[in-house]
Structure formats: structure tokens, C-alpha cells
Amino acid sequence: MTTAIFAAVFAAYYTNVLGRDFLPILATSSVLLTVVGLALRELILDAVSGISLSVEQSLKVGHWILLRTKEQTLHGVIEVMGWRNVRMRSRDDQIHFVPNSLIFQTILTNFSMMKGYTRVEIPFEVSSRADLSSRGQFLRRPVDPGPAKGQRNAAGARCHARPQNLSERARLI
């Protein structure tokens, strides 16, 4: 508020007392503000994106994310979320600093928000002479359920649920 009052007093003094035109000063200041604004564009965009991430709470510390950029694909856990960037640690223990503006401009997958289900792809080969109808029945038939709920498996871990078929077993892996 005091800056605006000072600018108004200076403009009145400059035009009335000194008898000069105020438009050249106004034009010069607008050009300088444009240059400064363009120089700070990324910083401002990162800060606004960081505020938006904080308000939305779609990402949190400890979430596993997959970030696809034009150059590379990053997969890791979020360690620190700041106003300008997100620090994440990949599986090979590398630390990546991702600008918040990049998070808003790329495709992001948050694995921590998948409600406990994970898609598993199991590649296998089938002979071209094989009977596919019998192979389909093999994949759909119940698998060995393993130990009952509450018992321990071969690794010594306590079992919580008994899978009924291959798709449920894949969900537990």
C-alpha cells in the first residue's frame, strides 16, 4: 500500500512540479516488468503448481509414482514435496528432483492410490498346434490354495486369505 502511495506522489511531482511527461517512465517500467516476469516464469509456474499439489493432496510423501517425460521414465517413491520441486528416490537409489510444473505437464501414475490391486503380466508361450480351449481352462481352474487362513506358508509368513483362482492369486503377489 505504501508503495502505491509513493508511486502516486512521485508521478504527481514528476508531471506537475518538474513539468515532464510520465509516459516514458511508465513504458520503461512495463518493459522491465515484462523481462523480469519472463525470467521468473518457470519459478512462478513451479510455485503455483506446488500450491496446487498441496491443496489437492493427490501426491503425498511415501507414494510410489511413475512419471513419463519426453526424455525418460522415472519410477520411485516421493521423499520430499516442496513448493518448487518434488524429490523422489528411484529403485536403484538415485535421487531425482522433479519440478512441480513438470508433474502437471506429464502423465503421472500414482501406484499408492490403487486400492491394493496390482496388475501383473505373466508372459508365456503356447505352441501354434496347441488346443487353446484347454489352455484357457487351465488358466481359469483353481490353483493350489496353499495353507489356510491363519496358518504359515513355506516361508514362515502367516496367510491372510486363500486365493480361489489364478486371477485372485495374481492379485496377492
Image (spheres, rainbow, N blue to C red):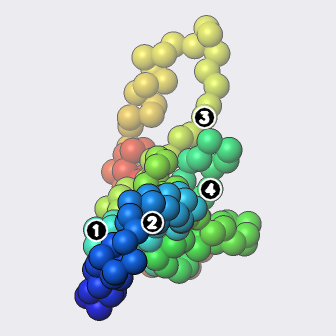
Q: Is residue 122 above or below residue 93?
A: above
Q: Nearer the viewer, mark 2 or mark 4?
A: 2
* Residue placed most toward the observer, 168 or 130: 168
* Secondary structure type for disc 2: helix
Mark 2 highlights which residue?
25
User: Of residues 169 and 24, which is closer to you in this image?
Assistant: 24
**Residue 109, x across and y down, in percent:** 45, 53
User: Which of the two residues, 25 or 108, is positioned nearer the viewer here?
Assistant: 25
Q: Earlier in the sequence, mark 1 or mark 4?
A: 1
Which of pointers 4 and 3 lies earlier in the amino acid sequence?
4
Name above or below for residue 58 compared with residue 67. below
The front one of 51 and 97 is 51
Q: Are marks 2 and 4 in contact (CB under 8 Å)?
A: no
SS label for mark 1 = helix
Disc with the residue nearer the chain's start (3 vs 1): 1
Q: CA distance from mark 4 to mark 3?
A: 24 Å
Left or right: residue 154 versus residue 136 is right
**Type of amino acid under label 2:** Ile
Callout 3: helix, strand or loop? loop
Which mark lies nearer to you, 2 or 1?
2
Question: Residue 54, how many percent across, how many down?
Answer: 34, 75
The residue tagged 1 is: 56
